[in-house]
Amino acid sequence: TNNPKAVIVIFGATGDLANRKLYPSIYRLYRNGKLSDNFAVIGVARRPWTNDVFRDKVKESIDNFDDPHIDKDEFASHFHYNPFDIQDLEHYQELEALIKELDGKHETDGNRLFYFSMAPNFFGTLAANLKSEGLTTTQGWTRLVIEKPFGHDYQSAKELNDQIREAFSEDQIYRIDHYLGKEMVQNIEVIRFANALFEPLWNNQYISNIQITSSEVLGVEERGRYYDGAGALKDMVQNHMLQMLALIAMDPPIKLTPEEIRGEKVKVLRALRKLNENEVDDYFVRGQYDKGMVNGEELPAYREGNGVDPESNTDTFVAAKLMIDNFRWAGVPFYIRTGKRMKRKSTEIVVEFKDLPMNLYYDKEHETKSNLLVIHVQPDEGITLHVNAKKGDYNASSTPITLSYDNNSEDKMNTPEAYETLLHDCMRGDSTNFTHWDEVALSWQFVDVIANAWSKKKADFPNYTSGSNGPEEADLLLNKDGFEWWDVK
Ligand code: BG6
């Protein structure tokens, strides 16, 4: 078969991400026949677990899958545990021996996938030691998957990247942005480049503004210690939001290769209007949630959370107006918005088309609405086109109607999970849906200016109620341009 063969080595195997995302994703690939029998997983972490303990944890993580024809013990038998101290070079030799043994046993052709799913301050040491101890040299391929956060500003990201590049070349490095694994984010390109309908209108002649919202209902929960040093700008905007923006705004690539697509995305990031620190307030709004009622329950403010500074100046909400200064987009605002403890969990992209120069059907009673193309990323997956049509009445007046495609109802059970597709892509050597260093660098350089401006001025926090749509300033940001957020649900 063409299915990938590899020994997958997961550093941080006892962690939350491995449990919640990685093991279930490997299971789904296995169940869906996307993984050959030629695979093994080595869990690496500090705790002194045995293979049996590890396999039980793996089985627990897939507890809610009920596939009668799959033998979960057989699946779990591919998993091995290797207790490990990153500083201890002898442990690398033991790991090397185990990889070799499993490579022989499962006939994985010498292919190795290292997955760094742990605190990033260890990435440098780990990469360096893997190389010096010979683990990165093999007869098959060697690839590195690396989780966010990739640095906390441009400088730290660059240092991290330099360290990793000592041991792995750029084409061996797969930087995860899990939004790029989402079905509807991948669909942006298909919708844009497989339809004659949209591309001719996809520019400043016909589009008035574009809105990208990713809202969450959950607060920071147990991640206060990490989050309080990050905030929504670094946690969501630098990566997920700017990646979606790049896909929405890029020019058509000449081919669907990773290099060509990336090249076009990079051009968008380069065209992003750079701000001076004193302009930040005109383009960016920050927020932090206060207590409030969510689903009938009174929840505490961000500052009262675990691991959070009681006077924290950290943003849990960001709204911004971004300008892309190129021929296609000059003059078209891209509004982005993301936050925790908002009204609903949803990621949506709204493309608002300009109104006709003269609309014969405009009347106060049946107001004609602007045409919208809405891409629903989650929880619903689909697209909706908002158009105007005749209302079934005695008048020749128009009324807004919607044309919808709902991916959930079509194929709900089979939509792959983000991590599942990304792991599969990496094992096949397809880096299209991973972020290249150039993208990471440009995103941080853009975001750093905002972060610096904010760090110099204490915000008036908290400024939005839990369960709301964020601070009022986020609405004003659009209102002053004559627009408003489309709450299309
Ligand atoms: C992660 C952030 O990258 O994305 C989290 O660190 C955030 O803070 C999450 O909750 C959102 O992802 P999703 O897939 O639930 O929209």
Image (spheres, helix red, strand yellow):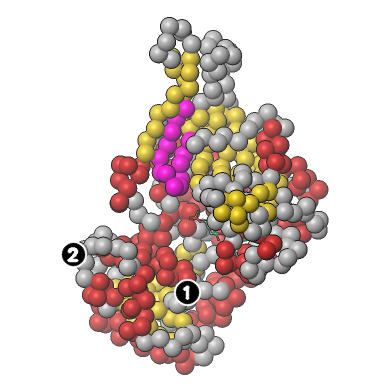
In this view, 241 is above or below 324 = below
Residue furthest left in the image: 69
Residue type marked 2 = His
Q: How many other residues sit within 10 Å of disc 1, few (<14), some (14-19) or many (≥20)?
A: few
Which residue appears at 32% of the width and 73% of the height?
59
In this view, 124 is above or below 414 = below
Mark 1 Cβ and ligand 1 under 8 Å apart: no
Which residue appears at 49% of the width and 36% of the height?
489
Q: How many other residues sit within 10 Å of disc 2, few (<14), some (14-19) or many (≥20)?
A: few
In this view, the residue in front, 402 or 282, is: 402
Among the two numbered marks 1 and 2 on one chain, the one whose residue lies closer to the N terminus: 1
Q: Residue 381: within the magenta?
A: yes
Q: Quadrant of the N terminus?
A: bottom left
In this view, the residue in front, 206 or 349, is: 349
Part of the protein shown in magenta: 374-386
Mark 2 Cβ and ligand 1 under 8 Å apart: no
Q: Position of residue 158 (x, y in %)?
A: 63, 67
Asked whether residue 377 appears in the rendered view, the answer is yes
Q: Position of residue 311 (x, y in %)?
A: 76, 63
Element on which disc 1 rests: loop
Q: Badge 2 is on which residue?
A: 69
Q: Badge 1 is on which residue?
A: 15
